[in-house]
Amino acid sequence: MNTSLRLSLGILLLIMVNMNALGIDNNDPVLLPVKDDPTISIRLWFKTGSQDDPSGKEGLAWLTADMLSEGSTANNSYETILEKLYPLAAAYSADQSMEMTIYRGRVHKDNLEEYYPLFLDGLLRPAFKEEDFARLKDRAHNYLQTILKYSSDEELGKAVLYDDIFKETPYRMTTIGGLKSITLGDIKQFYAQHYTRNNCVIGLGGGYSPELLARLQKDLLTLPPGEPKVPPKPKYEPIDGLNVTIVEKDAKATAISLGFPIDVLRGSKEWYALALANSWMGEHRNSSSHLFQVIRAARGLNYGDYSYIENFPRGGQLQMPPVNAARRQQIFEIWIRPVPNETKHFVLRAAIRELHKLVDNGLAKEPFELTRNFLKKYALHYAPDTDSRLGYAIDDRFYGIDGSHLEKFHQMMDELTLKDVNEAIKKHLQYNNMKIAIITNNAEELKKQLVSNAESPIQYDSPKSEDVYKEDKEIMKYPLKIVADKVKIVKVEDLFK
Amino acid sequence: MSKTTYAGLIMMLAAPFALAQTPQIFPYEYSTTKLDNGLTVILIPMESPGLASYYSVVRTGSRDEWEPGKSGFAHFFEHMMFRGTDKYPGPVYDEIMTGLGADANAYTDDDLTVYHINFASEDLERVVELEADRFQNLKYGEKEFQTESGAVYGEFQKGRTSPWFVGMEKLQDMAFDVHTYKHTVIGFEKDIKDMPNMYEYSQSFFKRYYRPENIVILVVGDIQKDKTLELIKKYYASWKPGYVPPQIKPEPPQTKERTAEVSYPGKTLPLLIAAYKGDAFDVKNKNVIAVSLLEELAFGETSDIYKKLVLNEQRVQLIEAQFAFNRDPFLLAVYAMIKDEKDIDYVKNEIYAALKKSQDVLVDEKRLNDLKKRKKYSFLMNLDTPDNVAGFMPRFITLTGGIGVVDELYAAYDAITPQDIQNAARYYFTPEKRDVVLVKGEDK
């Protein structure tokens, strides 16, 4: 029962992020060579994303990225591309988010020569065929119209929250109308405008040779030079009071997301202080989350409850934070996984009350110590492999971080004081002005309860501890100041039109 | 992140194909030890400075829920295992884990339940102690038990919003009459609702299945073999054996096609699931290995049907097959999401035609070789972190009790010929072994 082979080739990890200048304007390559790594990761960062969608053509950045990674090229049909990639166990994709698009691939060194031309063709020589366009547009439409609206209430709640906060800004949600109006001509134009040499940063990681970098740099010269035009960061409308959007549907359980914009970004000391507080309040999919403890562990009302200070797409699938979804404008967000319909008002109160307590009282010494020790080691798991570390290095560039965010994270956990954390909480968090998205049934009835600030007693199927009952009496009466004209009811079928 | 802890990956992958003559594909040296109480311990040291993964694989999943009215308990137990012991009550366990900065989680599947922790290897002893303690001394009161059942029902509700879940629930219920694969992993809804009343039963479930003979500990990463084994002996040796196997009834052969249509409360494109009764996993059974390759050859991205229905005619949003490995005969299933309701029969017939073709025509030798190459490279490219190495193993551990089968499996893939694939297709894909479920949305 044992294999005899042990290949111990040694490791040399050198994070070499070229640092001549910092931030979004710096186009120097981001390099992360790992000697003896038999795989190579390529991440080409194009400084474009949904924020560049023209008005009325929402979804254009998304479809353009899909056309590059899942369409035919001048040299091969998409069918042939799949066939050629197949034995290499490799693929390429274009991951598009609000501000970034990453054209990327990972391949075993043995297969690089076969892979490289295919990878590059996808980016440099897209065929933009009608049949690929029809297929991908149809898929995007199905996602918006049926999957998002009907089979993922949690993702829907988050989409509605972000759309409510960033309506009328370039961060707005993709619309069905926008998607429908997109033509192949629009795609070609978007591609020509945004996939340009001056809008691209090469990221390379793993066991690549220096020649590969030179080769990529030379080959990317066929992209037009372009004039990068990054739109200004979105100017969101300040939120006044508690603004509720109730999405009415025949929901068996209620999904809730709530939040408000925050003006602090990764890299600053305040951000790390706030990250510590946020981790205590709601570390993603971790039972150390305080909200998780209150709503799930003590009361069994759902599957989990978390909070965020950075956008976290695909939260249902990812265990650790995503890379290359960076944004210049972030929100503080609470994600409450579906709760029984009859408890929705109670749970909303419980969550906001916890936020209220955190803002008013700050973090105590003991949880502060516990959380910083937790994060020092937990952050080790954020990027365990070369490819995700390369992603982090690119995000470091985006945020203009001098050095590595993950190293800084570790270091800041030693440096931060409780006072730093509590000051950051006071400065950036609050509980009076926020958007709340609720996906549920009987919307009118909920509206009445919310507006009248009616008590929301809770009954459990099973006995709870005395402490829980005692606290429930406070939660059920916790005042939420919600006025009628700030509660909007939308039918699910009318969303994202 | 400090450079010392981060230094990362080991790259043993550089040479694997120099070894093509040997049947060994798994590139790490490992040891397997059985303690006196029956606990199996597999240790895989790899260079991952400062990091390790600790997996406790319980060879019990929803398959083992054989008593009527008790479906869903394997999964429920996964939740209860975080509720603590006398020595480390739930909140204390959580606090210690939080202090360790460990990434701890668990999942339940049809044949297994897996508890996994990624942690800083300097904390190894603490992790061994905590895991050994909760597996031996789990203790929870009726109140906590009942509260957790609420969380499980919440999870069921979350899952229920997927039309695929609705389809699979119907498929398994219809395809199996007596075998426990009749229910999905999370269990029948009526059983989940009744869980709060099953406190005593839950304890008997724990006593029968959470025993050393039924559990394999797998530790991967920056560890020393001898020291790790010593620690595991220290904390687990006192664990008493007492595993009681489940009384699962074998499913009689299916003799007639079964079909059903189920409605999904909401909007969805129609979903079609066409499944055939398979065999239990056995690496020496050529049919099992060959048909698992056919999954990709007949329905993967380079298959004729994918080209036709997804790329050219664009009648389906998605088509894929899953011919998985299970302890008992399960289902070889093909899934399609169809764009237009009027194409349902057309797509169904195309699926049948693709299977018929695999019975009538030998697969192209080059395509088969391409697939074998792909399987090897994708396996090797994903052995770069302790969690990835460990995460690949639990199913093989539950199927066979160890991980030696991984080398055997890749050797078995290598030996498969086009003729073997044709034989397997002829053996499995007959109409009387077929179960078909169609899911349609209620909202048009």
Image: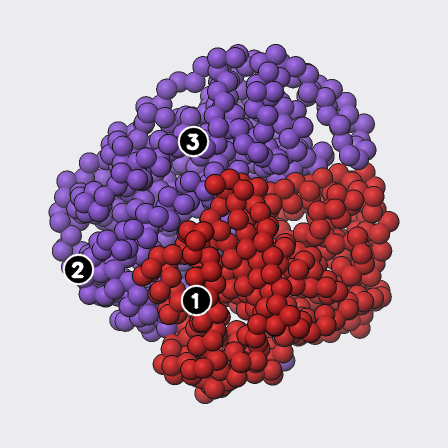
- Disc 2 on helix, strand or loop? helix
Q: Of discs 3 and 1, which sits in the foreground? A: 1
The residue under the point 23% across, 65% down is A76
Q: Report x, y in % for residue A267.
A: 39, 36
Q: Which residue is mark 2?
A: A219
Q: Which residue is mark 3?
A: A495
The residue under the point 41% across, 72% down is B374
Chain on which label 1 sits: B
The residue under the point 30% across, 65% down is A79
Task: Choose top left, top right, bottom left or bottom right for residue A120.
Answer: bottom left
Q: Of discs 2 and 1, which sits in the foreground? A: 1
Do marks 3 and 2 both belong to one polypeptide chain? yes
Kind of residue sitting beneath label 1? Glu
Chain on which label 2 sits: A
Badge 3, how many Cα within 10 Å: few under 14, some, many 20+?
A: some
Relative to residue B266, is residue B11 drawn left or right?
Answer: left
Task: Choose top left, top right, bottom left or bottom right for residue B393.
Answer: bottom right
Relative to residue B334, is residue B251 drawn left or right?
Answer: right
